[in-house]
Amino acid sequence: MIFENHNPLEGKVFQILDKTGKIVNEEYYKDIDRDLLLKMYRCMVLSRIQDEWALKFQRQGRMLTFAPTLGQEGLQVASMAACRDDDWLVPAFRSNAAWLYKGLPMKNIFLYWCGNEMGSKIPDHINMLPIVVPIGSQFNHATGIGMSFRYTKEDKVVVTYIGDGGTSEGEFYEGINFAGVVNAPVIFIIQNNQFAISTGVESQTKAKTLAQKGIAAGIPSIKVDGNDIFAMYFATKEAVENARSGNGPSLIEAVTYRQGPHTTADDPTIYRSEEKHLDGMSKDPIIRTKNFLIERGILTEKDEKTIREECKKTVFEEFEKAEQENITPLEDIFKYTYEEMTENLKEQYEEAKKWGGN
Amino acid sequence: MEALNNIEALNQALDQMMEKDEKIVIYGEDAGFEGGVFRATKGLQAKYGKDRCFDSPLTEAGIIGSGIGMAINGMKPVLEIQFQGFLFPGLNQLLVHGARYRNRSRGRFTVPMVVRMPYGGGIRALEHHSESIEAMLAHTPGLKVVIPSNPYDTKGLMISAIKDPDPVVFLEPKRIYRAFKQEVPMEIYEVPIGKARILKEGNDITVVGWGAMIPEIQLAVKDLEEEGISVEIIDLRTISPIDKEAIENSVKKTGRFLVVHEAVKSFGVGAELISIVNEKAFLHLECPPTRLTGYDVTIPLAKGEGHFMINPEKIKSKVKELINY
Ligand SMILES: Cc1ncc(C[n+]2csc(CCOP(=O)(O)OP(=O)(O)O)c2C)c(N)n1
């Protein structure tokens, strides 16, 4: 019903919780279990604090270039919360809160952004692909995983993300179109954070919404306030239920705001107006969720402080672990090329050892 | 003359050519307002307007495919692919169409465009930001593949690439974008495509490289010369078409040949050069022509990159091995 009532061609944006933390769309508001709400909130805060510290570590030269998720935590956490634990996540590179929600050890995330492939080794029990850098290709992988369930007889769904810029890539269209044709249970989520590096979304498309691109593929599509965890949760839930019951893919454009730089190599002040920045910051997903939780008595200022302290502790512990484990033995650069090292590689490995590999 | 680094020399070439030729249009992801993530096109939008220098949507196939169309109808697109690692969605357009229109239309339609992109490792970058794929491109008939190693060549080769009647892929070794400055003439000048440069003459061995390998080779050779080994260094400058003559003449003089490239070893440009040496100068050889290259693995992320990269120590050791063969 949510999708049906919010046709992006009619300029509709689905929202339940406004930027001050008030419920503005009672019709669609339902209670979410208190523990789940707190879990979502805690995960958003954890991701936020991790990003804030990672930016500092990066400036201290202890981390390399990375892409912060700052400001986009709400849509990621809510969409993950609307799925089952055994559903699949096919992320983009800016998906920190989703990784955390899915249970990826924070140490892995740090390792990856510290230039160590071990960060991409997802623990066996988590149905998730590693961070992907080339934009667009993940949409077809998600479709394929979704297609495979028909053969494996699993009733799982796949959630995949892409940026607003990514919707200009061919594979965006190929992925949603293919999934539609084969009825693959995939939820395609566009994180519209307004920018692809310095290029604003208005330079990506002449379409009024990104959501309407899904309509051409014939799949249910909706534009949602991505900083509103309720709207995101209930929209994703509807899409997930639809997919799980065999009705195929959906597309969600989640409107959000990238609060930080594209990556640590980027300076947003060059291309972003102060006005746009202030407007974006005023829609912060964490602040509005907090206001809601406090107003409903689910969270106190004191709990909030405790959560922040616990999160900061986790961030430091995990970063320390990553720093300690951040070595790449010489053998590691050879041994994952094939199941077995070829003769050619064995030869090259022996040669490489001469240069003091550990 | 003016002291410029590689990126400044490139910017100057683009600027001067845009001023001269109104058919030049520059675009790519973030290439307009910001001047590209490395600022190669900085200031061009301000100077020439949004029609001539702009941010394209995020679509490599779109950038290269539309560039082909532009070029076919008489424009001169100079396109930026943000990183070579993201060329792949556009590779279909480049290899399947850009390289072939001339042949396919029996000369009626041609694609005189330039596709620029940073490539190569050594900057502790993210995944897909460090590969060197010159061999993949050079393997396609119809494309020219150029790689400058210094500011003088960067400007002169870019000007030649823009004037070239065929599609030119211009690979920029990003590690040395800002590594050093060199005196560069203020006026427009050309460095011919397809001609290698003898960077230093020598008698005992020929060492060939390109791009970011050149400074590494120079460092190695400085030490080798102190030990009494006389090295001839050739900067290939153009991967395709390859300057066979320069290689042949040099090896006939020195009798020894080493090619150094940071790309993976197998099926690469090193193998091509060694074939040329065998074909052209076999009887002059004192030892097997040899390549020193990256390993046949996915380029490691920053933490393991040191294992992979070529450095002066490796070059020195290989040269001595060949001298003492
Ligand atoms: C195929 C491809 N082209 C170019 C890039 C370089 N690049 C990395 S991120 C980025 C911008 C992405 O913008 P968007 O899709 O909106 O996602 P966001 O970064 O805003 O989350 C670009 C151009 C890439 N990673 N992959």
Image (cartoon, coloured by chain):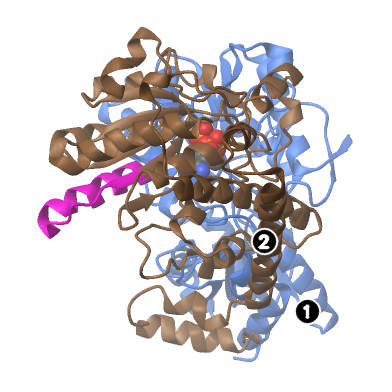
Distance Cα–Cα, label 2 vs label 1: 49 Å
Amino acid type indicated by mark 2: Val
Would residue A157 be counted in the magenta stretch? yes
What shade does chain A have?
brown
Q: Which residues are magenta?
A: A135-159
> Which chain hosts label 2?
A
Q: In the image, A98: left or right of B207? A: left
Q: Which quarter of the picture shows residue B22?
A: top right
Type of the residue with mark 1? Leu
Q: Position of residue A124 (x, y in %)?
A: 36, 70
Return the x and y of residue A189 as percentages of the image width and height: 39, 35
Which residue in the rendered view is the most extreme toward the right? B2
Secondary element at tag 1:
helix
Residue that appears at 25% across and 44% down: A143
Question: Which colour denotes chain B?
Answer: blue
Q: Is residue A163 magenta?
A: no
User: Is the residue marked by circle 1 packed among few (<14), some (14-19), or many (20+) residues within 10 Å?
Assistant: some
Q: Are marks 2 and 1 on the same chain?
A: no
Disc 2 to disc 1: CB gap under 8 Å: no
Determine which residue is flagged by label 2.
A315
Q: Which mark is residue B224?
A: 1
The image quadrant that residue B118 belongs to is top right
On the rendered image, what quadrant is the C terminus of chain A found in?
A: bottom right
* Residue B192 visible in the shown view: yes
**Disc 2 or disc 1, which is closer to the eye?**
2
Q: Residue at x 28, y 32 (%)?
A: A250
Q: Is mark 1 within 8 Å of ligand 1?
A: no
Residue B29 picture location, percent across and down:
55, 30
Q: Position of residue B194 (x, y in %)?
A: 55, 45
